[in-house]
Amino acid sequence: MKLKILLVSAEVYPFAKTGGLADVSGALPPALKKLDHDIRVIMPQYPCTAKAGRKIQPLKIDLKLSDFNGKGTLFSSELTGGVPIYLIEHDGYFNRKHIYGEPGSDYPDSVERFSFFSQAVLEAVKRLDFKPDIIHCNDWHTGLIPVYLKSLYRNDPWFSQTKTLFSIHNLGYQGNFPHSHLKVTGLDESLFTEEGLEFYNQISFLKGGLIFSDTLSTVSPTYSQEIQTQDLGFGMQGILQKRSDSLHGIMNGVDETVWDPETDPLIPANYGPKSLSQKKQCREDLIKIFSLRPNKKSPILCMITRLSQQKGIDLIMEARTALDELDISLVILGTGSAEYESFFQQWSKDRPDNIATALKFDESLGHRILAGSDMFLMPSLYEPCGLTQMYALKYGTVPIVRAVGGLKDSIQEFSDKTGKGTGFKFKIPQTKFFLKSLQKALSCFQQTQTWKKLMLNGMDKDNSWEFAAKQYSSLYQKTLRS
Ligand code: ADP
């Protein structure tokens, strides 16, 4: 059955990106369109959206909401495959340098910004004459949409047949704010209860999404189990346990129009499973960019990541002395906490021939680093899905990951006896276990044919969005029947 779907996200690649949420929001819709759904996307318009290289046109539709200052205006553009995307402009709320706030924090008026966005989305679809069967909300910024639908918009005939799916991309980000901000949302005080928006005496946008949506999903099967435990539930495990029948784990995919070494315009030489030797040119390019001086037969490792505790950066810091004794080079591309940034900066200053750090968010450099490296490190403490390890597979850059969440699901341990597997995994987040996995990888690297087999196993793996899109499609249908 062809469905009318509206996907709502605070960031959508290539219009705005801080992490994996943008990649998913930009790639799932074209895959759903291929399944013949009428899928449309909506997001805020930020200054950075103008740099996406896409034509953005005004729709001459104003969104003036009684609960909020100023007015929004609607724009439209297209994603890959001709998927319509609408952008809500509001000078006061979204015309800012950052998407969410200064790195590591949210703007103080986040409640107002994302409450406005959520209500404006509902008004926008009416003005666009689009009656969605499913509104697919993503992460806390959209958590109030299901709440509005079941309160302020409960009797609105436009939405009488509309159901909601709320996808959790990272439970660690919850949009919790002081109770006093509730009035800004336009929602009634009666919703501030344990069964409603109240979370440890604050209001929680995420909890709103978890409780008021018809169906829930998260981005890998393992993470859907982990978030129901005290260890990784971030206080929401009780709610998720209660809703476990409605909670589904669907693995993200790889957008092969963006991440494919055979066609990638951002890397110096294209290569694929049948032209592996060209990857050498990408390695040479990487060496040149960072003036590295690796031994000819030693591997280049890389990390492309937010520098936050979640990503297991402390493990790398603890392992520094041991890593310094190995014949390896390491390139880090990332931004985040000042402590981590200065650690990597100092490390590359101490060992400029083998350690390189780029403290910035640079999409194009990310592609070149991934293509030029031999191994990719992702020792996350928790990882809902993780995308970069799947991009690494595609680029023949062998992942060494912690066996958690989507990393556990997407990487199979390599065995040099059977020749099966795509990378290396360790379970316990301690330096000695990480180093053990790394040692195993380094010894395989010395066996040219074994390493080639391992690279090819990863490159041949089909992680395209087609499979995930089919699963979302079934989940939407199931949600409509519920
Ligand atoms: P998360 O969403 O938790 O940050 P993911 O692995 O799901 O992690 O997605 C991260 C996305 O952001 C990937 O596309 C990755 O390549 C990209 N990325 C992260 N940091 C940087 C950076 N400093 N420069 C360029 N791309 C980055």
Image: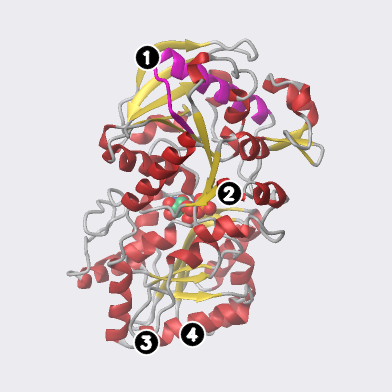
For residue 340, what is the image quadrant? bottom right
CA gap, disc 4 and disc 2: 42 Å
Secondary element at tag 1: strand
Q: Residues within 10 Å of mark 3 (few under 14, many from 20)?
A: some
Magenta range is: 109-135
For residue 96, what is the image quadrant? top right
The amino acid at mark 1 is Leu
Residue bearing the label numbered 2:
245
x and y percentages locating residue 411 in the rendered image: 43, 69
x and y percentages locating residue 311 in the rendered image: 58, 61
| Point 27% across, 36% down: residue | 36
| Point 46% across, 34% down: residue | 480
Q: Tell me the mark number nearer the camera, choosing from 2 and 1.
A: 2
In terms of sequence position, does the residue under pointer 4 or pointer 1 come before the other? Answer: 1
Residue bearing the label numbered 1:
59
In terms of sequence position, does the residue under pointer 4 or pointer 2 come before the other? Answer: 2
In terms of sequence position, does the residue under pointer 3 or pointer 4 come before the other? Answer: 3
x and y percentages locating residue 458 in the rendered image: 33, 69
x and y percentages locating residue 159 in the rendered image: 50, 20
